[in-house]
Structures are given as structure tokens and as C-alpha cells.
């Protein structure tokens, strides 16, 4: 964890959980419908649980996070299993290394934590495609999360691998899994297909046995509860601090007249999308509402207790009115931070659970530990031989990522200009078919970018026969709602002036493979011209070698004045950065990633434009929020006041011309608030 110190003094806790076997040694877990609680080994049992996702935490920190959750007074954890994390390639299952789910369960069991398992197959979780593997989309009309034959076949094959592995970990079989969730908030999906849910119920019974407590979780409305619940699956609800808990549990009672009260996702915080304000949920509110629920005898899982990180390409996205991608950090304003540090919220929750080990919070001042300059390695087109070892596929019209069988990351689409364009000519994505961002160059000159739902036209210039390079970025598949069939790449033709662009060469890019194979070498600088004064525009790779300097603890990488891109350290893909849009300004670097003996290799793919200084900073604190970070309150107030004053002045002058005074005041007030926010926001981003 970051420089902060964490001390648990009163270690000798009254353990709420596990190992309370009956004298007979008989282990049992069931629902007491008569008395409205869970029964563990024949005794009443109430869980106080927290969500943690092993897929968002490096394996070497699993134990650390679990111990901290136990020390916070929890007796259980709730865990999602992301299918696509284990079966990225159809039929190839990975349960080793960072995917070693059984090792994670074992660590939890050793720590004394019970497990509420949520194996999906769909999980939402703000995770790429809600945990579904993108290869499902190779069936063009597949109806996900329904009784669609192709979907059901894939699901059955997966559950036939996963669930038998989980069976020995059931509490009743000597492990720590007490309950298992079927699907995830299914009632909020449009399909409302009971045949699908019945099929899942059959599979879960088949592979886990009839005695396992299976449950569903749904949002707190009648419609969701109606479509999401099924006989034989215990119905639970989820809701946050702004809900009337009596009303919410009354709704659970209508669907489940007897049995324990359960809030399966009590929101301790919330997610961020790029361009959002950083979401926070008040610690006092969380602890107060938690206390009220526990006092009612309810079982509560806090979502999240430890959020972690969307490393690599694992972030999901939402699509309500427009496509919005989830940021790299999944800190979630949770009681344990992204880096596993306890927060004020953890202390407030602890007080409610009423066990009192002392915890010293880490200091809040942000220090820059190291500043470090990168150099340019080359652009995509000069590196194609390295990055696209299989070479291009030729196609008259563009193919999607799914058709190319490259599901994540970046792909290059190349064609030529069909005629001379001496005047700026619009390049249009008429059907909004750029999923999700396209970086356009003509003969090496960056022309700009197209962005799904946001920027559907740019102007380009060039000569007939010039090479048009379009690098397309997959920003993470939609993980919620009816738009989860989220194909990536160029989904429809691009039109240049009056011409449809055709005759493409499409290059799959394996950037992660190249970097894992040791590219780029630190002597790449020699083969490439001296660092250019003029910072490049458009997609360019940079790298740097940080000599080992004893830095081996958690740090946060800040790419100040860089625009948008992806970062790798020692071969590990840390995720996307996008300080130009915010609110996240730093990327979490787990300490063990940095070597104390070997030179550390940092590779950056900057997509739009690097700053001239080419510097990156290692800091000892995260900055997930633009406000309240480095600027003083006084400075913010000053910026605010000055811009506000000018606005008022402007509208006052306008008012002398027109006498609709009150409307002007109202209008100017709202405009000025927004303007001041924008000015503050932009200024702070520059710091
Ligand atoms: C499984 O994933 C790990 C990374 O967590 C990787 O090191 C390993 O090579 C993968 N195994 C297979 C069989 O793909
Ligand atoms: C889980 O832990 C308990 C008690 O510490 C132990 O008896 C049991 O064997 C463990 N289960 C597994 C599957 O390792
Ligand atoms: C919550 O709802 C119940 C039942 O509808 C009502 O009696 C109670 O006043 C509500 N509580 C709050 C804090 O609004
Ligand atoms: C890439 O770099 C090469 C070599 O420096 C240069 O000739 C070319 O114009 C650049 N292409 C792009 C798309 O920036
Ligand atoms: C493209 O160029 C035309 C003519 O110069 C101009 O009117 C138009 O605003 C430009 N469009 C964009 C999207 O830049
Ligand atoms: C960094 O790359 C160099 C080769 O360029 C390699 O020798 C070194 O081991 C790498 N460092 C780490 C920590 O993997």
C-alpha cells in the first residue's frame, strides 16, 4: 500500500464467522423460512459482507485485501466470476495466475471469510460486456441472456467447467461458499425470459446439488422483481443510501413472504465514467443506513468494499442516451481504496459493526516521488511489422473486431484516398458506426478523430492515392441494458465527400503480445531519430527506462498534459488514461510491479498528442477527482468569483437594452455557474 501505515492493534477479534461447527462436525447452510433468517450449522446466522473482485486486484494483493476486510468486521465477501476473464478464447479456460479463483477462495477461507458467489454467467459489474465473452457476438443475431440456442449452448459449456470446480468449495462440502447467485439483476434486462432462468436453475442444481442456497438479486422495483425472480431461487433486493429501507424490504417480502431480509448490493460509493464528476457517497450516510439494516436483522453486502482497478481493457461502458466508457480506476469511493488503504468510511462502518481494532489512516498530502522523461519509439504505421505479425486482411468493406477475431484493444484500418482533396472534405460516419474512437491520418498527417455518438464528421485533405490510416479503439463493451451486443471497430462504411471508402487492409494489432515479448527495447532510441522538439500528433508510442531506485511500494502515475492513451509497465497493461476528459488523473501502479533490481520499462501509447516535455510523474497518492485535489479553496473561489463577475456584468449591460430583468438574472445565473465550473475544471486539469 502507499506510504501510509496501517496498524491493526486489537487483533483478537470476536470472530463472527466460520469454524463454528456443530459438535457433530455437521456443516449445514440453509434458509429458516419459519424464523426469517439463515441457518448455519443449525444456528441463526446474519452476514455482513463486502464485495471484492479478484479480477480487479493483482494476485499478490489478494490476501492483503481479504485480511483488511476481515479486520473491518466482515464475516463474508461477495465475489463475481467474470466469464470472459477465464475464457477469453472460446474453449480455452484459464484458472491459473491472476485467474486462479480457487486460490482466491482458499485465501478467503484461511482468513475466516465466508463467500457469496456470483458466477453469472452475466455479471454486469461495470466489467467489459458484463463478463460475457465477446466471441459470443460472432453469431450475428445472438440474443444474449435469453434461451437463444447458441447462447444457451455456450453458457451450458461454461457452467459445466466452472460449477464443478466450485462444488467442493460449498460450505456444506467443507468449503466457504454459503450462497450462490443465479444471473444478475435479470429483471432489469428487456428479455424477461423465464425459460432462460429455468435453464440456469437446472444447471446450477445439476452441478452444485439440490441443497445449495441459490438466490437472485434485483433492483428495487416491481417490474425488476417480477422478471428477475423464479421459484426455487431466493429473491433478494439491492439498493443504496437514498432508498427507504422499510419500503425496499417490504418489496422483497412481497416476492419472498418468508425468509431472511437481504440487501445484496448496498452501495458504498459509485462508478465514474470518463467526463463525469467523480462520484462520492457520504460515509456517515453509509454507516447510518448500514446500522439500520443490521438492526432489522437484515443480511447486507456492501458493494463495493474494495473496488480495485480495471486493468488492461477490462472496463465496461454504459449506453443510455450515449456511449459512456467506465474509467480505469474502480476505486468506487469504497471503504478500502483502490490501493487497499482504509478510509474514513471504513472507520465509520467499523463503528457500526462494533469491533474496534485501531487503524491509522494514511496521510492525505500528495507528494511527487519521481519525475521521469520518455522518448518517442515510433508510430503505428512505422511499427506495423512488430505489432501486426499476422498481417492485414483485405476486404472491400470494413470488418468488425469480432469478424477479425480480435476482441479487445486497437485495430488499424488502411485504405487510399479515391481522389484529390484540395479543399477540406468531410469524412463522415453516417450510421454512427465508429465503435468507439477512430484516429485518422492521411500520409502520416493526423487529421483528427471520430467518436461514437459524439463526433461523426471531420475534414480531411490529401492527394489521390494517399494512405488513409484509421486506428480504431475499443473503449470497452457496454455492460448493462439492452445494448450489450456491442460490436467494435468500423461497423458501417465511412463516406468521404461523395465516395464510400472501400478496399480496406485491416491489421489486427497485438500490442500486448509485442510488449510481453520484450518490445520496445530500451535501445529503440538509437534506431529512432533524436527526441523531436515538436510533439507528435496522432497515435505514437513512447517509452522510458526507470533505473531501479528502491521504489517498490504502491505509486500513482500521472500523465500531466498528455491527452489520452494506454500505459504498460514491465509488460503489464495498467489501463487507459485520459486526463483531458477526467475525472481520473492518475493510474494505480501496484508496488510489486516495479523491480528493485532490473530497469523498469514503461511504454505509453498516446493517441492524440503528447506534451513537449514528455514527462510522467510517480506520485504517492491517487487523484481521481479534479476538485479538492491540488488547488486551494482560495484559488478556486478566486477563479469562480472573477468569471462570475464578468458574466453578471455582461448580462447587466444587456439588461439596460431590455427590461426583462428577472429572466436575465435567472438565465445569467445558470450560465455563469456552468461557465465557472468549466473554467475551474479546465484550469485544474492543467495542474
Ligand atoms: C492464464 O493467465 C495467466 C495470467 O493470469 C497467464 O500467465 C497464463 O499464461 C494463462 N494461461 C493460459 C493457459 O493461457
Ligand atoms: C476452510 O477452512 C476451514 C477452517 O479453517 C477448514 O476446516 C477447511 O478444511 C477449509 N476448507 C477448504 C476447502 O480448504
Ligand atoms: C419509509 O417508508 C415507510 C413505509 O412506507 C414510512 O412509514 C416511513 O415514514 C418512511 N421513512 C422515511 C425516512 O421516509
Ligand atoms: C510514422 O513515422 C514515419 C517514420 O518516422 C513517418 O514517415 C510517417 O509519416 C509517420 N506516419 C504517421 C501515420 O504518423
Ligand atoms: C469542414 O470544412 C468546411 C469548409 O472549409 C467548413 O465549413 C466546416 O465547418 C468544416 N467542418 C468541420 C467538421 O471541421
Ligand atoms: C526491461 O527491458 C529490458 C530489455 O529492454 C530487460 O532487460 C529488463 O529485464 C526489463 N525489465 C523488467 C523489470 O522486466
Image (cartoon, rainbow, N blue to C red):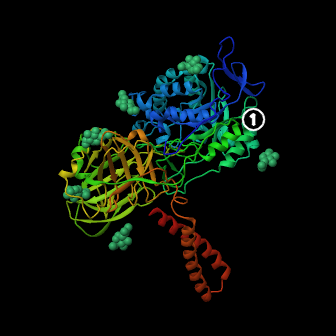
Left or right of residue 535: residue 154: right
Front residue of this view, candidates 580 and 641: 641
Q: Residue at 45%, 28% (x, y): give it.
A: 100
Q: Position of residue 237 (x, y in %)?
A: 67, 38
Q: Is residue 565 above or below residue 118?
A: below
Is there any visible trace of residue 402 in the rendered image? no
Is the shortest distance between ligand 3 and the CB of mark 1 under 8 Å?
A: no
Front residue of this view, candidates 604 and 85: 604
Q: Is residue 610 above or below residue 161?
A: below
Residue of label 1: 253
Q: Position of residue 631 (x, y in %)?
A: 52, 63
Quarter in which the C terminus is drawn: bottom left
Q: Is residue 162 above or below residue 318?
A: above
Q: Position of residue 97 (x, y in %)?
A: 41, 30
Left or right of residue 265: residue 614: left
Is there any visible trace of residue 149 in the rendered image? yes
Q: Residue at 55%, 76% (x, y): give it.
A: 642
Q: Position of residue 490 (x, y in %)?
A: 36, 50
- Residue extending furthest top? 24
Q: Could you classify mark 1 by the number of other residues whose Cα lies within 10 Å: few (under 14), some (14-19), or many (20 or more)?
A: some
**Quadrant where ligand 4 appears:** bottom left
Q: Secondary structure at mark 1?
A: helix
Residue 548: which quarter of the image?
A: top left
Q: Residue at 30%, 54% (x, y): give it.
A: 374
Left or right of residue 548: residue 177: right
Amino acid at each position: 500500500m502507499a506510504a501510509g501505515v496501517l496498524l491493526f492493534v486489537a487483533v483478537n477479534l470476536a470472530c463472527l464467522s466460520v469454524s463454528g461447527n456443530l459438535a457433530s462436525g455437521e456443516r449445514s447452510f440453509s434458509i429458516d423460512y419459519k424464523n426469517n433468517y439463515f441457518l448455519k450449522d443449525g444456528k441463526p446466522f446474519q452476514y455482513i459482507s463486502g464485495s471484492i473482485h479478484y479480477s480487479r486486484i493483482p494476485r499478490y494483493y489478494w490476501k492483503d485485501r481479504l485480511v483488511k476486510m476481515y479486520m473491518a468486521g466482515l464475516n463474508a465477501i461477495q465475489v463475481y466470476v467474470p466469464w470472459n476473464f477465464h475464457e477469453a478464447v472460446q474453449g480455452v479456460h484459464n484458472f491459473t495466475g491472476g485467474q486462479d479463483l480457487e486460490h482466491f477462495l482458499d485465501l478467503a477461507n484461511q482468513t475466516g471469510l465466508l463467500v457469496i458467489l456470483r458466477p453469472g454467467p452475466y455479471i454486469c459489474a461495470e466489467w467489459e460486456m458484463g463478463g460475457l465473452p465477446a466471441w459470443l457476438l460472432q453469431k450475428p443475431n445472438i440474443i444474449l441472456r435469453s434461451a437463444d440456442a447458441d447462447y444457451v449452448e455456450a453458457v451450458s459449456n461454461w457452467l459445466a467447467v466452472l460449477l464443478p470446480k466450485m462444488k467442493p468449495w460449498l460450505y456444506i462440502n467443507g468449503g466457504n461458499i454459503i450462497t450462490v447467485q443465479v444471473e444478475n439483476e435479470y429483471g432489469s434486462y428487456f428479455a424477461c425470459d423465464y425459460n432462460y432462468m429455468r435453464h440456469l436453475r437446472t444447471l446450477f442444481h445439476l452441478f452444485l446439488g439440490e441443497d445449495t442456497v441459490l438466490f437472485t438479486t434485483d433492483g428495487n422495483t416491481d417490474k425488476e422483481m417480477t422478471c428477475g425472480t423464479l421459484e426455487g431461487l431466493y429473491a433478494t433486493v439491492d439498493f443504496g443510501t437514498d432508498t427507504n429501507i422499510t419500503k425496499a424490504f417490504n418489496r422483497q417480502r412481497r416476492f419472498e413472504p418468508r425468509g431472511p431480509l437481504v440487501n445484496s448490493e448496498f452501495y458504498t460509493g459509485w462508478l465514474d465514467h470518463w467526463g463525469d464528476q467523480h462520484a462520492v457517497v457520504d460515509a456517515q450516510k453509509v454507516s447510518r443506513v448500514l446500522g439500520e439494516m443490521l438492526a432489522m436483522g437484515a443480511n447486507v453486502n456492501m458493494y463495493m468494499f474494495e473496488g480495485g482497478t480495471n486493468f488492461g481493457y477490462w472496463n465496461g461502458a454504459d449506453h443510455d442516451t450515449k456511449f459512456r466508457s467506465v474509467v480505469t480506476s474502480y476505486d468506487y469511493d469504497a471503504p478500502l481504496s483502490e490501493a487497499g488503504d482504509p478510509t474514513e468510511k471504513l472507520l465509520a462502518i467499523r463503528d457500526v459493526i462494533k469491533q474496534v481494532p485501531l487503524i491509522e489512516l494514511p496521510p492525505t498530502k500528495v507528494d511527487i516521488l519521481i519525475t521521469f522523461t520518455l522518448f518517442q519509439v515510433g508510430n503505428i504505421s512505422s511499427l506495423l511489422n512488430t505489432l501486426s505479425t499476422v498481417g492485414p486482411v483485405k476486404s472491400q468493406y470494413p470488418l468488425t473486431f469480432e469478424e477479425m477475431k480480435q476482441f479487445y484493444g486497437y485495430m488499424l484500418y488502411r485504405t487510399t484516398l479515391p481522389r484529390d482533396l484540395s479543399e477540406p472534405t468531410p469524412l463522415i460516419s453516417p450510421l454512427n458506426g465508429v465503435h468507439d474512437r477512430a484516429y485518422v491520418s492521411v500520409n502520416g498527417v493526423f487529421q483528427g478523430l471520430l467518436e461514437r455518438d459524439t463526433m461523426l464528421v471531420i475534414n480531411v485533405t490529401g492527394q489521390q492515392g494517399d494512405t488513409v490510416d484509421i486506428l480504431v479503439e475499443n473503449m470497452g463493451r457496454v455492460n448493462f441494458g439492452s445494448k450489450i451486443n456491442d460490436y467494435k471497430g468500423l461497423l458501417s462504411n465511412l463516406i468521404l465527400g461523395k465516395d464510400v471508402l472501400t478496399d480496406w487492409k485491416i491489421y489486427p494489432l497485438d500490442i500486448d503480445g509485442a510488449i510481453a515479448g520484450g518490445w520496445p527495447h530500451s535501445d529503440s532510441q538509437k534506431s529512432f531519430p533524436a527526441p523531436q522538439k515538436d510533439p507528435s500528433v496522432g497515435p505514437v508510442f513512447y517509452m522510458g527506462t526507470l533505473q531501479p531506485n528502491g521504489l517498490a511500494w504502491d505509486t500513482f502515475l500521472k500523465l500531466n498534459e498528455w491527452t489520452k492513451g494506454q500505459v504498460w509497465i514491465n509488460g503489464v497493461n495498467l489501463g487507459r488514461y485520459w486526463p483531458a476528459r477526467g475525472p481520473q488523473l492518475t493510474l494505480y501502479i501496484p508496488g510489486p510491479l516495479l523491480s528493485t533490481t532490473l530497469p523498469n520499462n514503461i511504454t505509453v501509447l498516446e493517441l492524440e498528442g503528447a506534451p513537449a516535455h514528455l514527462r510522467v510523474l510517480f506520485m504517492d497518492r491517487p487523484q481521481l477527482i479534479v476538485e479538492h485535489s491540488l488547488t486551494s479553496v482560495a484559488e478556486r473561489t478566486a477563479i469562480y468569483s472573477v468569471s462570475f463577475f464578468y458574466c453578471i456584468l455582461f448580462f447587466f449591460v444587456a439588461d439596460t437594452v431590455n427590461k426583462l430583468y428577472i429572466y436575465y438574472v435567472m438565465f445569467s445565473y445558470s450560465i455563469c455557474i456552468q461557465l465557472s465550473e468549466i473554467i475551474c475544471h479546465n484550469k485544474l486539469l492543467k495542474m
